[in-house]
Amino acid sequence: MKRLNAVLFILCFATFTFAQSNYVLNEQFSNNNNEWSTTSSDTYTTSLSGGEYHINRTAEKNSSYFKIPVFIDIAEDFDIEMKFKQNSGILNNGFGLVFGYNDIDNFYTFVISGDGSYKLAYYEKDEYTKIKSWTSFRKADKMGKYQTLRFKQEGSKWKFYSDGEKIYETEKRLFFGSKLGFVVHDKMSISIDYLTVKQKNTDINLIKNPKNGYKSVNLGANINTEHSERTPVISADGQTLFFVSGGDPNNTGGAKKTDIFYSKKQENGTWGKRVNIGAPLNNRGNNSVIAISADNNQLMTMNKYNPDGTPNGGGISQTQKVGSGWKIPEDVIIKDYRKLREIRRLPPFGR
């Protein structure tokens, strides 16, 4: 059972300890709950059938990107893997992962080619940089055969694998955004069998060696479940606790996504039964509260929202209280957002 432990005075500054490995994303393409592009255009056709995602690119130049928002805590280790096969097409250009995607001018790619080479590169502000130029690493014998690509962050390193063999290692970098998916260059047909992201579950625990006599207090069954409770934020008046729960199949986006919950402090000093904050703050994406204003009337939330409340990728949003609920969050524009994004928690406004 996941335990939510907290000293309320320092709750917003809690640190995290790993519990067990967990799928942030376990995409087996048995359905399209994650809303992958399934469409036809002048340059490509995408479809989902037979437990696979199919990309048939007909254009002979340029590239196409197919991605969804996936919350990965880039301050911690993670493990991304895809299994796929090239059905047809050219051999001298790449297909593979696009990650850390913010927009068409800011993203990373890790690709291999049919002739047995790989490349790691990125765009930043529309400027192209090769981290590793095209490098041959195997024979060109994989057409029509399944193969795997794997990208792991371990400590300060990024490690890249093909069919279980490590082919490159480099220093880790910051992501530009939170979208993850596939890139296909030039004219070729690709089928993806699965895409997974693993990162360890976290409990909410005290900072080490708390001062001034404060003690850890388990918040009990009103807060904790058999799932993962994390990212606590407490209101300035100490009366409301916000947190997220992951792994629960009853979440708005299912077990793979996080929902926001809150609890009110009771007269006896304990926390009341957790309440799902509901729509519009919880949608089919990963949802979380970052901070609450001192007057309890504004929340800052993780990720961006469309005007209809559906997910709109990575970023920060702000919402205002209306009656007993909340408005659909609106984007918060932060200058030089990429350099600031290693901040793990924001304290309540006015503190």
Image (tube, rainbow, N blue to C red):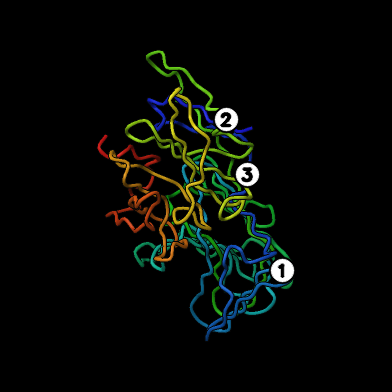
Residue at mark 1? 142
Q: Which residue is mark 3?
A: 22
**Mark 1 secondary-structure assignment:** loop
- Image height of 15 relative to 298, above or below: above
User: Residue 103 appears at what percent x and percent y?
Assistant: 41, 65
User: Do tag 2 and tag 1 residues touch (Cβ < 8 Å)?
Assistant: no
Say whether marks 1 and 3 touch (CB < 8 Å): no
Q: Residue at x 70, y 64 (%)?
A: 30
Q: Is residue 261 left or right of residue 331?
A: right
Mark 2 vs mark 1: in front: 2
Residue at (52, 55) in percent of width and height = 70
Question: Which badge, 1 or 3, is on the more N-terminal residue?
Answer: 3
Residue 82 visible to the viewer: no
Asked whether, in this view, residue 142 is left or right of residue 229, the answer is: right
Determine which quarter of the picture holds residue 144: bottom right
Is 197 on the left or on the right of 310, as rendered? right
Question: Where is 137 relative to 291, above or below?
Answer: below
For disc 1, the neighbor class at 10 Å (few under 14, some 14 to 19, many from 20) is some
Dot 2 or dot 3: first in sequence order is 2
Which quadrant would the C terminus be assigned to in this image?
top left
Q: Residue 229, position in %: x, y? A: 54, 38
- Camera-near label (1 vs 3) is 3
Give the residue type at disc 1.
Lys
Residue at the image point whose x is 49% and y is 20% from the top: 216
| Residue underneath mark 2 | 3
Foreground residue among 147 and 328 = 328
Mark 1 or mark 2, which is nearer the start of the sequence?
2
> Three-letter amino acid code at disc 3?
Asn
Amino acid at circle 2: Arg
